[in-house]
Amino acid sequence: MNKSMKAVYNAVVILAAAAAALGVGALVFAAVGADIAKAYTVILTEPLKDLIGLTEIAVRAIPLTLIALGIAIAFRSGTLNIGAEGQMMMGILAASATAIALPDLPKPVLLPLAVLAGAAGGAVWGTAAGILKARLGVNEILSTVMLNYIAAQFYTFLLRGPMMDPEELVTGSGTPQTVRIPRAAWLDRLIPGTRLHAGAFLALALAVLVFILLWRTSAGFRMRAAGAEAKAARYAGIRVERYVVAAMLLSGAFAGIAGAVEILGVHRRAIEGVSGGYGFTGIVVSLFGGLHPAGIVPASLFFGLLLLGADMTQRLADVPANMVLVLQGAIILAIVSARQFMNNPYVQDRLARKLSRLLGKPAPNPPAGSREACPDPSDSPDPCLADEAEPRTGGGSPAETEEHR
Amino acid sequence: MSAGSFILNILILGVPFSVALLLAGLGETINQRAGVFNLGCEGIMAMGAFLAFLPPYFLADTPLAGSANLIGLLLAIGAGVLLGLLFALVVVTFRAPQGIAGIGLQMLGWGTAGTLFRKYVGGVTGVAGIAPLPIPGLSRIPILGPILFNHNPLVYLAFLLVPVFWYVLFKTPWGLKVRAVGTYPRAADSLGIPVARVRYQALAVGGAMAGLAGAYLSLAQAKMFADDLIAGRGFIAVALVYFGRWNPVGVLGGALLFSLAQSLQLSIQVAGIDFPYEFAVMLPYALVILVLALVRKSRMAGPAELGRPFDREQRV
């Protein structure tokens, strides 16, 4: 296959995957009796129509970028972190507790301190799963899922008990939330009248940092090596277990920062439902962005659009907002399926052979390493068994040898 | 309340609680024995629970009300099979990584159930559900009777399925094929066992069981549906398979352990013992992590190729 054909091939794979994901979504839209075209139009265009919509997309993209960066670090190091949701909650708790406990500190101290506390909170939760995997071989998917449920309970426990706003007890409304975070810890709003906040700069800076870490440092190289092929990495002297823990620590810290940024910039107090599925959407964003910061930033904007659009379909097209989960699930399945076809020289070669047979052209050269390029030695007769093998002993018919040349 | 009746209560509550985990765990055992790790179990359970809930909800006052539960169960099983086959397409035919694909299936199933539920039902509404069926005679045995023989028919079915699954897995040719494609697919392939087809079959069975488990939750246990009805039981079922060492009998033990932990938690609350509610709810999830951490120590023989796609053209 030549270059342009490869590009066409990859484009076809992407289009097929997109069509499959949209098709699954369309099935569910049809099942709830919605106008499919209208529903997709609302999701994909309605948020783009005014400044509020555009900034709200960015507001959602900030935590998504941070979480997806963390998940990409873990994924590149060979661990699948499903626990961003729980790590984010622990980050929120740590950040808000720090900010509320030290209200008198000046802004340049308190704000970074609160964000770092958030990172630490998430990191503890991530590291727990990392150590469980490295030391005891506990599947990280299962442990992070369980840690999510535990964190969610711990979160409501603190918000309804020790960390609850005393005012709520006085007025008796009992809303599970903390007191307002001191102004010194707030992330500033960038555009008056919108919720877009300075966390955007932090997310972008960390995206650059993650790129440098993973692709420009030797620690990052070791992490990626441990993820790509643990056995080979171990053989090369890389202490894979240590990098598994480090990756989960960083991954958790990023989710924790996402939580901290979300309450310091948007809510200004810890309330219930802040994480609202960001942890899971972050997985999709990370995959969609190709596990690379340069892809993750635009991908998080796209999913910010989807999240906001799904909220709008609830009002405009009468489709429940849960629909966004359906789309995310379908997108994950489509991406992981398509990845097996993208840039796969063997599938491309097989396809090229079929095509050339159809067109009556000579078959192209097989790619290096394929079965056609270097036939398995066990396919040819073993010379030691020459006596037992039937007619072939003569060295094959002339026609056959001809063909082999 | 005396200590005796307290414990009796825990046991009486615990047995039916184990059924959803048991049904899903049995299906997942077949999946994993065939080498496929299906985290989508949670999503399939959500779809099963929702679809099983629909007929009793909509047919309550129609002539079909009598068979509504049965229709619901069949719908749940059918949807489970379809989702299992969809998963098979992704991880067997397209050889996608199973962990992340499972999360995708979980979101898809959970999201679809939630979307349809909000559209067609709206709020949480109860259904009559499946009534208990005390076994005549046996249910009147003191202590054992109420613990074992005074439940709805699905409870008995689930417990009877344990030996059935054990027999199928270890004593039938199909069970041998399932274990072969999960342990050494290359050898199985060379002996003419169609690896992909057996994995498809295993995933269909696993999906059916997960659907049934979901149906049990909405029809027999909670007698209602809500978005978060499954609450991680699908993931716990996956963990139980590790705990039960890929053996149906072990899975039964694990399911009972967890359901007893859960009923202990409920009994503590009912008894008014002062213990934060949230920590009580954490208990089963923390127990999963603990169990997974301990199980590994005694290195058991699981399916060697668990989680790896099979490509017959790949060189080894």
Image (tube, helix red, strand yellow):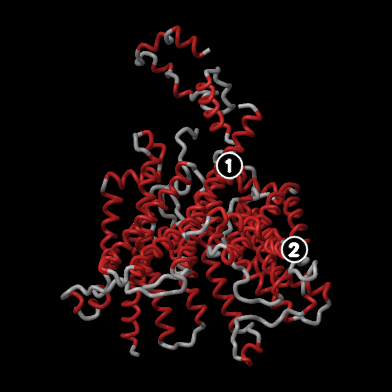
Residue A163 vertical placement versus A18 (above, below):
below
Q: Residue furthest bottom?
A: A170
Residue A182 vertical placement versus A323 (above, below):
below
- Mark 2 belongs to which subunit? A
**Can residue A176 be seen here?**
yes
CB under 8 Å between discs 2 and 1: no
Type of amino acid at the residue the image marks with label 1 = Leu
Q: At which x and y percent is residue B187?
A: 39, 37
Question: Which residue corresponds to the image point at 49% horizontal and 9% vertical from the top-left?
Answer: A402
**Which residue in the protein does label 1 denote?**
A15
Question: Disc 1 on helix, strand or loop?
Answer: helix
Question: Which residue corresponds to the image point at 42% horizontal and 53% vertical from the top-left?
Answer: B83
**Can residue B297 be seen here?**
no
Q: Residue furthest top?
A: A398
Q: At which x and y percent is residue B227?
A: 47, 68
Q: Which mark is residue A51?
A: 2
Q: Is residue A52 left or right of residue B74?
A: right
- Mark 1 belongs to which subunit? A
- Compare marks 2 and 1 and give the one earlier in the sequence: 1
Quick one: A107 or B260, which is closer to the camera? A107
Type of amino acid at the residue the image marks with label 2 = Leu
Residue A8 vertical placement versus A260 (above, below):
above
Q: Dividing the picture into quarters, in which one does residue B148 lie?
A: bottom left
Q: Is residue A33 left or right of residue A289?
A: left
Quick one: B8 or A336, which is closer to the camera? A336
Check disc 1: other Cα within 10 Å, few if <14, some if 14-19, many if 20+.
few
Question: Which residue corresponds to the image point at 48% horizontal and 76% vertical from the top-left?
Answer: B281
- State the separation of the CA atoms marked 2 and 1: 31 Å
